[in-house]
Amino acid sequence: MNTPARLVVLISGSGSNLKALLDASADPGYGATVVAVGADRDGIAGLDIAAEAGVPTFVDRVKDFATRGEWDAALTAHVAEHKPDLIISAGFLKLVGAEFLAAFGDRYLNTHNALLPSFPGIHGPRDALEYGVKVTGATLFFVDAGVDTGPIVAQTVVPVLDGDTEADLTERIKEAERRQLVEQVGRLVREGWTITGRKVTIP
């Protein structure tokens, strides 16, 4: 049997996407295992989830470094120690820098709560509601130096319902986002991928 792909998951909060990946990777057929969890803050629930699963953790807080570049170098070194095949931003609220992207840019995944290139940034559901779109969703993409601009792996559609509040829509997108993340990470590690310009191909 093939050795499972090595996942490093980066988090900033509750760890719900991390938990979904841990649950999926418990199945040997999934093809991946979470080998480390990194965070940009202490005392978050996601670190507790990792500890309960016996997964090593590390924390690199931006405020502990003199410059953002030094933080980026430390994060890069910590991730590299675990020899990842894929790094997953699972609610990680920091933009990585040039050193991290040079090391991992073709295998660093992020998920966004809108259908990119529409509504980038931190208020995807709110912006979708304000614009009046009838559908929105979630986008899984490889991170580049821009904000939510990297090559797209997959997208899933979530309808906008009459009477939706931002909280309602955000919650439905999160559920769809989580399902897509687990499904597509499994596909990537089992089948491989190529990135040509903006196009991601899974054989």
Image: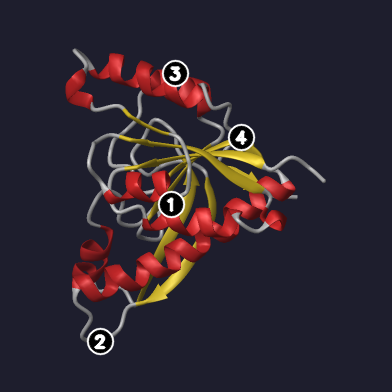
Q: Amino acid at mark 1?
A: Leu
Which mark is drawn over residue 5? none
> Tell me, what colour scheme is on the image?
secondary structure
Callout count: 4
Q: Position of residue 174 (x, y in %)?
A: 36, 65
- Amino acid on which the number 4 mark rests in the picture: Asp
Report the residue marked by disc 2.
162
Judged by depth in the image, the label closer to the viewer, 3 or 2, is 3
Indicate which disc, 4 or 3, sits on the residue closer to the N terminus. 3
Decide: is 79 above or below 201.
above
Q: Position of residue 195 (x, y in %)?
A: 63, 38
Q: Are marks 3 and 1 in contact (CB under 8 Å)?
A: no
Q: Which structural element holds mark 2? A: loop
Which of the marked residues, 2 or 4, is nearer the chain's N terminus?
4
Q: Which residue is mark 4?
A: 85
Residue at the spot of label 1: 18
Q: Quadrant of residue 85?
A: top right
Query: Disc 1 or disc 4, which is closer to the eye?
Result: 1
Give the label on residue 77, or none.
Answer: 3
Tell me what residue is drawn at x 23 percent, y 80 percent.
Answer: 164
Real-space Cα distance between discs 1 and 4?
Answer: 16 Å
Circle 1: element type = helix
Front tag of 1 and 2 = 1
Q: Residue at x 33, y 39 (%)?
A: 147
Give x and y (percent) for residue 10: 40, 39
Q: Are marks 2 and 4 in contact (CB under 8 Å)?
A: no
Near mark 1 (Cα within 10 A), the count class, few <14, some 14-19 or many ≥20, is many
Marked residue nearer the N-terminal end (1 or 2): 1
